[in-house]
Amino acid sequence: MTTTTHAFIEATSPHTMNTYARLPIAMDHGQGCRVWDVNGKSYLDALAGIAVNTLGHNHPRLVPALQEQVAKLIHCCNYYHVPDAERLAARLAELSGMRNVFFCCTGLEANEAAIKLARKFGHDKGVDKPQIVVCENAFHGRSLATLSATGNAKVQQGFEPLVEGFVRVPFNDFAALEKAAASNPGIVAVLMETIQGEGGINPARTEYLQQVRQLCDQKNWLLMLDEVQCGLGRTGKWFAFQWAGIVPDVMALAKGLGSGVPIGAVVAGPKAAHIFQPGNHGTTFGGNPLAARAGLETLRIVQEEGLLANAAQVGAHLKTALEKAFAANPGVREIRGKGLMIGIDLAKPCGALALRAAEAGLLISVTAGSVVRLLPPLVISRAEADEALSILVPLIEAFLKE
């Protein structure tokens, strides 16, 4: 990289906590599916801030709306009604087939609230020590409770003792869930990602989701789905669970809901809609006027610009092209995902590819050690997808020959 970027990093990094293994790049501005660093180098964005920038960068309809809102009101406390938050809650309920919404700021806050909902649900029906079923390889956040629900020992290490009350089972293994149900009478809920993101882009099978929904109904458990990464149109439907024809009792959202403005949400169906009462939960910033406006505009633009169909079509094109490109390559174990949430599972650790791709002008990430993850903005065109493929495929091929 050039001297300018290194000078910028050296001038700023000593005063930030060493919590991220950052690449030697500092971003300056973006337009659509492209971003430019402080040196003027251009990148095709196939990561979207890890599924956050739903509408890409500097969207011509989102930016003026946010500018207008900033000039009117950025924040007011939850002592008062926030009309746009109430409109956004109604829209999310309509799109999901659920009932009401609690707004927060992040995915971990949404999952933390879901955990609290499940515990109070259990206590309200007389369960002294409620337990929640969670899955291996899951990722639900980095607070102590969501860290404990996460199925990654590396993430948990150094933060013990973990929060109790979780029963862990293999993902997509219904027999294991039934066995856990038989031996743990305190279970009150199942919490899982509809598509595991940090765990390697692992989709829950349609049949599995349907079986879990049925078991939760039989046992009077809450089915709680974490759609922080896979929701909000990323798979080609508003929510990934809709591919299975089911509706959860609780759903956690964040990331792409505000197209870059921090917002999270817990959406509840009838079984969970009235568990929380005043004083049970709260937030300072959740549902503030700016975040609510961002959420409303994001949903409106996704619908009016046909971005669900675009995610499905461009995502299918990407996945098919990747499968064709690597069909005869034993170093590629599997291409997984749905819509614009794609994982390329390699036969060896591939963390180095994130920097190599950036040097070649493409932003990606590597998750679960050996999975190249693609999460482009929902506005990506087929031509831009082909450009991403023209950079990424040779990089992977060369890397696998090393």
Image (tube, rainbow, N blue to C red):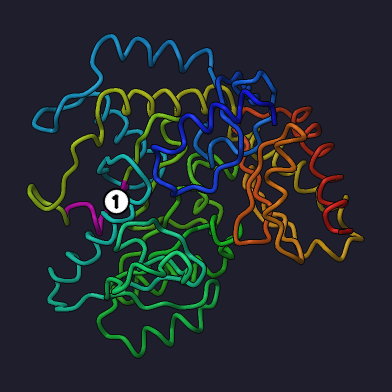
Q: Position of residue 200 (x, y in %)?
A: 60, 60
Residue 136 horizontal side relative to residue 165, left or right? right
Position of residue 19 relative to residue 3, above or below, is below
Residue bearing mark 1: 268
Position of residue 68 relative to residue 217, above or below, is above
User: SS at mark 1?
Assistant: strand
Viewer-side residue, 209 vs 66 = 66
Viewer-side residue, 39 vs 300 = 39
Q: Position of residue 91 (x, y in %)?
A: 35, 33
Residue 272 sits inside the magenta stretch: yes
Viewer-side residue, 303 vs 30 = 30
Q: Position of residue 104 (x, y in %)?
A: 28, 41
Q: Residue at x 10, y 51 (%)?
A: 277
Amino acid type, label 1: Ala
Residue 297 horizontal side relative to residue 80, left or right? right
Q: Position of residue 24 (x, y in %)?
A: 61, 37
In the displayed image of the protein, which residue is found farthest to the bottom? 183
Position of residue 91 relative to residue 189, above or below, is above
Q: Which residues are magenta?
A: 266-274
Residue 40 sits inside the magenta stretch: no
Q: Residue at x 19, y 78 (%)?
A: 129
Tell me which secondary structure the magenta stretch mostly adopts: loop
Residue 45, quarter of picture:
top right
Name the image quarter holding the N terminus: top right
Q: Residue at x 30, y 72 (%)?
A: 162
Name the image quarter holding the C terminus: bottom right
Residue 200 horizontal side relative to residue 142, left or right? right
Give the class, few, some or many, for how many residues have Cα within 10 Å of label 1's Cα (few <14, many ≥20): many
